[in-house]
Structure formats: structure tokens, C-alpha cells
Image (tube, rainbow, N blue to C red):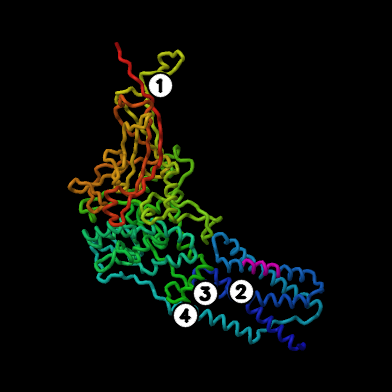
Amino acid sequence: MNRHQTTKTVSHLNSSLLVTFCITALTGYLSHLNGVPVLAQISQLIHLPIAFIYFIYLCIYIHQHNKKVLGVRRGWLLISGILLVCLLFLQAIFGFILLLDGVRADNIFLQKGHQLLAYLAVLIFVAHIILYKLNDKRSRQPTSRYQLTGAGYCQIAAVILTFLLMYLLHTSSARPYTIEPMVKNYQYDYGPHPFRPSQTETPAQRFIDIRALNTTEKCAFCHSDIAKQWQVSAHRQAASDKSYETNVTLLAEKKGITATRYCEGCHAPLALLPGQLSPGGEHAGISGTVANQQGVNCQSCHGIDRLVHNKGVASYHFSINEAYLFETSSGVLASGLNKLAIRYHPEQHKSDMSASLHKTSEYCAACHSQFIDKDVNGWGWIKMQDEYAAWLASPYSGMNDAKFSHSEQKRCQDCHMPLVESNDPAAKNGLIRDHSFLAANSMLTTLNNDHQSQTKIKKFMQSNKVRISIEPPHRKQATKSQLPLKAWLRQAAQQPFYWYRGEQAELNLVVANIGVGHNFPGGTIDINQAWVAIQVMDAEGHLVYQSGKVDKKGYLDKQAYQYRSLPIDRHGDIVWKHDLFNMVGKASVNVIPAGEADVVKYQFPVPYWAKSPLGINAQVNYRKFNTQYAKWALQDEYQPLPIITLSRAYLAVPIREKQEAY
């Protein structure tokens, strides 16, 4: 190659390097502009390939430049050049890692470092050029000039054209979200508000396009770990739960499909928000519908930006996030570019999906508190479950009595969404919140044969949250001591415990709620079962007394001591089907507030035939659904539901012969 050709090649290289450098710097800067998200996202997508091309040109240029300046002693010029090369290569390494992994919570320092290195590189590059100019003046050599060649102009034109094409494609293919209901002639049976009797609000009370709600598949593209956890959760099955399908179908049959808005705001936002719940539409209790399959999906929770109030019944305000690049477009290319935009430019995404409200216990009150009013039951306002108020009153909230608060305040999320190891992009220090939402619903895991989740639920419920103890039946009239005692000390002396044959034994069990952050039990306590079981056996294994037994058909002893509520209808009958629209009050409510205890008293005769000692076994048991409701609600899917023992205690009490007085 002759000198002229070499000079021409170098000129082309210098021109291409200069152009790609300028475009890389400009798109990098534009991608971090606030207030113009589409411009920033397009700039980010262009920045990725152009930065890669720039790096190739840079490597070639450095190789040729080194041969040219090798051995030339120019002091600070050489140092600035070496420093510039080091910064550019370090920046390229950071950029390459971000290209492979995307922008994640645990590599945000790489993004910040990449930006900082870019600014430093520009400063040092300017200094390097100034030093180069000054050196040329001293040596009286003509200063080299960078001139744009045809290739450079083509690169600029190609980038501008690409930018315009992406913008035009975005605007032309976008299908704006509709604000009209999915069902024509949408019925407003509960006044002008479109979502009543649900307490849900949206901007200007507009309906939400189903495309903005049904985003689970797209979310799983990046958040696969979270999607797997959610897949087995009760949230995902909130509408496909067979018991819910039965109950919401009963409500639709008795009160009409518009009444199902009361339930669907929490169980199936994908049916409520798009305006599906009107004659001609389908409620989420119908198997196979999108709302039935999705239940409470990603957007259902992450689209909530504030609460309307904390009384529950879906009392949240739901907003659609600002659409990303190609978010409302169709087609494989548009979908792919949209995912890339979120992957490499997630700032808006994180802002939209991580409202500060989501980190509070109050956030959970939107659906885990509940009331019913005259619109639904035709009677009046009745307070139902309220886990949020129970938590506020607990030692864990730190808002009740600070002097007696738990040493470590806990939110709902700390227990029900513990930190677990994950490689998810949202993970910090390798940990994310568990989206399987651990709780007490062992019914779903049983029907699904989900043994892994069943084991997790059992471990969660048995982790020292509820404790039972047996008070020894001390004899107040007896004193056990070999020391002479003054009369005033006798009341403080240790008293032995035993029973006499033939006497009426009295026994106290203490059940303490020491680890549940709200009342025990919580949730739908009208259909769940929590009870105390006790068995008294003599030394030869003969049964002396029993309470809380479950028979072969799965029914609990009617005399068992239970923790539950008994809702009643206007005729005074028990509302046992969880048909809340018939409920007008409660006959009784028996729960244990957080940090408190309950004393359960038993009496039984001590048989003359019993062999000493009497062994007392006591347990606190829990079962998701009582058998009567389970058989009705689960229908042909019914199977015996597991009984989980939350705590147990044992005490051996001696038996004595009572001496007759002569």
C-alpha cells in the first residue's frame, strides 16, 4: 500500500472514530435526560450498537496510533494519552457487563461508573488535544486536522434515519389504551361510580385497558424468579381457587354480576378494572378467563400508587404507568425493542413499579381489611376482617404503646414476604422479597399436590407463632416444703399438683399469640378452623377425657373450643357458606390479639380405674376450611384438608387416693 493510500485509510479511520465517538457520547447523554422518556429510550437503544462499533474503531486507532508515537517523548501528552486509553477501556468493560446483564439493582454502580468514566474521558480527551496542539506549535509542525469523509457523513445519516424510523414506528404502531368498558351498555347499578360496591378508584374513574393489566408474561421475561414464586402463590390463585369460584358464582346468581365487583376488586382486578363486570361480561369465577387465570397478577399490585382509605374492599387508587417505547404496539419486533428498552433503561420502570407505599403495612390494608354495607347485604354497615387494624394494635407496629413494643418493628412484608436468595434483576445483595406470599392457605397446596409449598407453609406456621401451655393443677390447700414456714409465707410456698380419684378435675390451658403480627387466627375466620385439642390418658393408655377430636368423616367435635367468628343472617341463622351478602352481624368472635393470651378451662371426672399418672396432651390445631364449607365449596375437587399442629404441650399429673376422715 503506497503512502497516499495509507493516508487515505487513516483519514477514513479518523473520521469514523470521530463520528462514532460523538454519536456515542450524544446518545449516552440523551439516554439519561429526564422528562422525555421516549427520546431517552430510543437514544439508549441506538447507544448500544454504536458504542460497540466505536470500541472497534478505537482499538484499531490505538493500535495504529501507538506505532506512530512509540518512542516519542512528549511527557504529559503521553501520560494523558495512556490515561485516556485506560479510562476508555474500563468504561468499555463496564458497558459490556451492562450489555450482558442489563441494568440491575446489584450492578447500578456499574451504570454510575460508566457515566462517570464517560465525563472523565471527555475531560482528559480535551486536555490531550490541547497538549497535542501546544506541542505542535512548539515543534512548528502543521497541526493534523480531522475531516469528515463520505463514510462519516453516511454514519451520521444512518443514525439520524434510524432514530426517525424508530420514533415514527413507535408513534404509528402505538395503539392508545382505551378508557371504555369491555362490555357494551355497562350497568351502573350502584350509582354513578363505575366500580362500586368495590372501593377502587382510577384517574377520573376511567376504565383500565386489559393490555395494561395483563403484563405477567412480559414481567417474567426479566423477573423469572419472582414469576416462579408468584405462580404457586395464593395471589395468583385468588380467582381460580375453587372455593372462590363457587362463592362468586353464587353471588352472581343471587345478586347479579354487577355485585361481584365487591369481590373482584381484590380477587380479580383484571375483571373489575377493564369493565368486564356487567351483564354480557364474565366474572373471574368462570374458568379459563384471563382474570381467572391471573388472579392478583404483577400489575394488580404494582399499579397501585396510593390508598383511597384503609378500610379495605379494594380501597386502592390504580394508575397506568407511562407507556414505554413500543409498549402499546403489536408485533415481535416492537415487543423485543420494548423489552430491551426496559432492560437497559429501567429508571422509569422502577419509578412506576416501586411506589414508596408498597413498603408499608398500610398498603396491604386495601384488600386485607374488609367491611360490608347496605349496598351488598341490604341491611347496614358491618366490619369484617381487619388485619391492618390488628397489626396497628400489636407490639410489632410500634404505634400502640412504645414502652411495650416489640424490640424489632415488623411490617406485613417482613413475615409474609421474607428475603430470599435470587439472581433477579431487582435483587439487592442477592436477596429479594418472596412473592409466594407465605401464609396459612394449605388448602390450595393440597389440591395442587404442591408438596414444596405445603412444606414451606407448615414450617412458617410452626415457627413459634402460637404457643400452648398447661397450668399444673396446684392444690391450694397443700404446701410442699420441708422447711418450717411462718404463716405469712405459706401463700408464697410451692404447691404440689395432683388429683384424687373420683374428684372433678379442673384444668387450665393457656394459648398465647406470641408471633403472629395480627389476631390469631386471621383472614376468613368464619370458614377457617383453629381449635384446641386435648387428650387425657392414664398410665396404661386408656382414654380418660378428650376434646377437639376430628371424626373419620373430617368433622370436628362440636364441643371443641374454637377460635372463629359466627356470622348470622337476618333470620338469626349461621351464614356458613361465606355468602357475605346475607350477613347482617356476628353471633360471636373469638380471637387472640397479637402479644396476648387466652385461658381455656376444662373439667372432667377422674375415674377410679385410672392408673397414675394422667398424661395430658394439648395442641393448637389449624385447618384451612371447616369440613362443612369445604365439601360445599370445593364440590367434586374436595379432599380431606391437612390439619397443622401449631403448638403442643404435655403434662403428667399424679393420682392419689383420697383418705376418708374417721
Please, what is the dominant secondary structure of the magenta stretch? Answer: helix
Magenta range:
85-94
Q: Which of marks 4 and 2 is nearer the N terminus?
A: 2
Pointer 4 residue: 168
Q: In which quarter of the image is the C terminus?
A: top left
Figure quadrant of residue 76: bottom right
Q: Which of the two marks, 4 or 2, is nearer to us in this view?
A: 2
Can residue 303 be seen here? The reply is yes
Q: Which of the two marks, 1 or 2, is nearer to us in this view?
A: 1
Q: Which of marks 4 and 1 is nearer the N terminus?
A: 4
The answer to whether mark 1 and mark 2 are in CB contact below 8 A is no
Q: Which of marks 1 and 2 is nearer the N terminus?
A: 2
The residue shown at (54%, 73%) is 45
Left or right of 477? Residue 56 is right
Query: Residue 384, relative to residue 660: is it above or below?
Result: below
Q: Residue 371, image x and y in percent?
A: 29, 51
Left or right of 479? Residue 46 is right
Identify residue type, mark 3. Ile
Pointer 1 residue: 495
Q: Which of marks 3 and 1 is nearer the N terminus?
A: 3
Q: How far apart are marks 4 and 2 (CA)?
A: 23 Å
Pointer 3 residue: 42
Identify residue type, mark 2. Ala
Left or right of 474? Residue 158 is right
Q: Distance between the residues labelled 4 and 1?
A: 89 Å
Specify few, some or many for label 2: CA neighbours under 10 Å numbering under 14, 14-19, or 20 or more: many
Name the element at disc 3: helix
Identify residue type, mark 4. Leu
Specify few, some or many for label 1: CA neighbours under 10 Å numbering under 14, 14-19, or 20 or more: some
